[in-house]
Image (tube, helix red, strand yellow):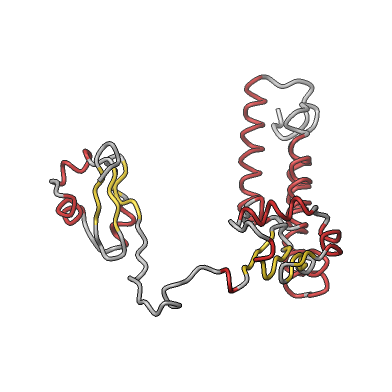
Amino acid sequence: MDFFKGQETLSAMGWILRSIVGFTFLIAVAKFMGQRSISQLRFLDFSIAIILGNILAHPLSDEKLGLKGSMITTVVIVVLYVAGVGLSLKWPLFKRFLDPPTLDLVRNGQILYPNLSKARITVEYLFSEIRKEKVEDINKVSLAVWEPGGTISVFLDTRFQPLTPSDMQITPSPFALIRPIIVDGVIDMTLLREMGKDVNWLANKTGNAPSEISNVKLATIDDSENVRVYSNDLRS
């Protein structure tokens, strides 16, 4: 039996194998195309996602349809997609077609209603997005921009922006990224090697013997190599 051809009937194992192959193939295709979150999908990405979903959905629900044709079609579409992305990088006219320019929705506290219509959004939606930026009064907005990805960027008027240490001429402490180094007794060896340390050094920092590391529920480390150990109730 040719697994990739259509069949009159499929056994339960046949459906399972077809699902596994289809899923694995789709993951490989998505990896090749590059990953973006849903909010970052552009027009071309969204179109391709819908097309690929439909192409692979049919042979996964109809035993008379083979996987071979769907997989070939998918490969062709992915090649066209990659070519389209390449064209958008080299041909500005094609890029403007795929990614329309930004639209100013609010300028100096005034709503630009014609641009709302072009973006096909309502005033209520605009206010909802502004509230997500913790802005309660639209008069405080210096600029709100509709981005090609479908999000709204909001910029406050400088009079209403919070003070920063530089505004107050204060030198803050350097930024230190805190990352978990032990979770449920398991050491992140990649992070430990990245910092040029070993298990004995970490055990000394946590106040435990190397054999007792498994008892540590959570420990974090910052860029200054300061280790903080949390007890089982996650209170230091």
Of 46 and 28, nearer the camera is 46
Question: How many numbered marks, from 0 up?
Answer: 0
Q: Residue at x 74, y 41 (%)?
A: 53
Q: Answer with the quarter of the image where residue 146 lies.
A: bottom right
Above or below, 101 against 190 in this view is below
Q: Residue at x 69, y 58 (%)?
A: 151
Q: Residue furthest bottom?
A: 169
- The quadrant of the picture occupied by the N terminus is top right
Q: Is residue 196 left or right of residue 101?
A: left
Above or below, 198 against 108 in this view is above
Q: Residue at x 31, y 60 (%)?
A: 222
Q: Is residue 166 left or right of residue 4?
A: left
Q: Is residue 156 left or right of residue 181?
A: right
Give the x, y percent position of residue 42.
73, 58
Q: Residue at x 66, y 44 (%)?
A: 26
Give the x, y percent position of residue 185.
26, 41
Above or below, 225 against 127 in this view is below
Q: Is residue 181 left or right of residue 54?
A: left
Of 151 and 194, nearer the camera is 151
Give the x, y percent position of residue 208.
14, 46
Of 169 and 193, nearer the camera is 169
Give the x, y percent position of residue 99.
77, 65
Above or below, 72 against 11 in this view is below
